[in-house]
Amino acid sequence: MPEVIAADGALFENRWVVVERPAEGESLTIPEGQAALIPADLWLAGYDQFAGREDIGVWFDSHDEPELLAGKAQELPLIAVNFPRFVDGRGYSIGRLLRERFGYRGELRAIGDVLLDQLQFMKRCGFDAFVLRADKDITKAARCLNFFSQTYQAATDTDQPLFRRRAS
């Protein structure tokens, strides 16, 4: 299983398996005895079955709307956002919305086509765990999380832009 890097640079083992969306006409199959991430809309559809389980989290695809979980996001131990291609930036918006609008405080994980040069920007959008693309060297990830010493804009990691921080 691939390792996960936390926003503080620590590495830990990935105990979560991503369960792909079942094909048309098939039912969702969750592996026995393993923590699973299921599509967010399917978690909501099976809410009575899945609510309160610490071994079930959800994942969003880049075209999914985080509003699906409005009022229920805090019930999840982990939310993952899939970045299907590095040029698809919709996952950044999903991360910010989950943190800022819906107040999600649990683990927010980036999965999919996650590259080293994206890590600090994902972190600024509220992601606190990352599963790198298989061909990337995770030992270089910690340095990439804090590549820039200062940032100009306000984001989930700081509520003031640089000019206000310098003035105070």
Image (cartoon, grey):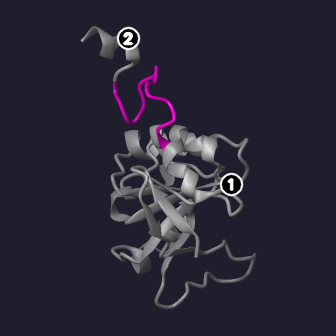
Q: Position of residue 110 (x, y in %)?
A: 55, 54
Q: Nearer the viewer, residue 129 or 24?
A: 129
**Which label's residue is closer to the chain start, 1 or 2?**
1
Q: Which residue is mark 2?
A: 163
Using the rendered view, name the quadrant where residue 164 is placed.
top left
Q: Position of residue 6 (x, y in %)?
A: 43, 56
Instruction: Kindly identify the residue that appears in the image at 39 percent across and 17 percent down.
Output: 162
> On the rendered structure, is 14 left or right of 29?
left
Please check the rendered image and state whether residue 150 is part of the magenta-colored stretch, yes or no: yes
Instruction: Kindly identify the residue that appears in the image at 64 percent across and 52 percent down.
Output: 114
Q: Indicate the amino acid at tag 1.
A: Asp
Give the class, few, some or many, for how many residues have Cα within 10 Å of label 2's Cα (few <14, many ≥20): few
Using the rendered view, name the quadrant where residue 131 is placed.
bottom right
Please check the rendered image and state whether residue 146 is part of the magenta-colored stretch, yes or no: yes
Q: Magenta residues: mostly which secondary structure?
A: loop
Q: Position of residue 42 (x, y in %)?
A: 56, 70
Q: Which residue is mark 1?
A: 113
Q: Indicate the secondary structure of the residue bearing disc 1.
A: loop
**Quadrant of the snapshot with the N terminus:** bottom right
> On the rendered structure, is 31 left or right of 89?
left
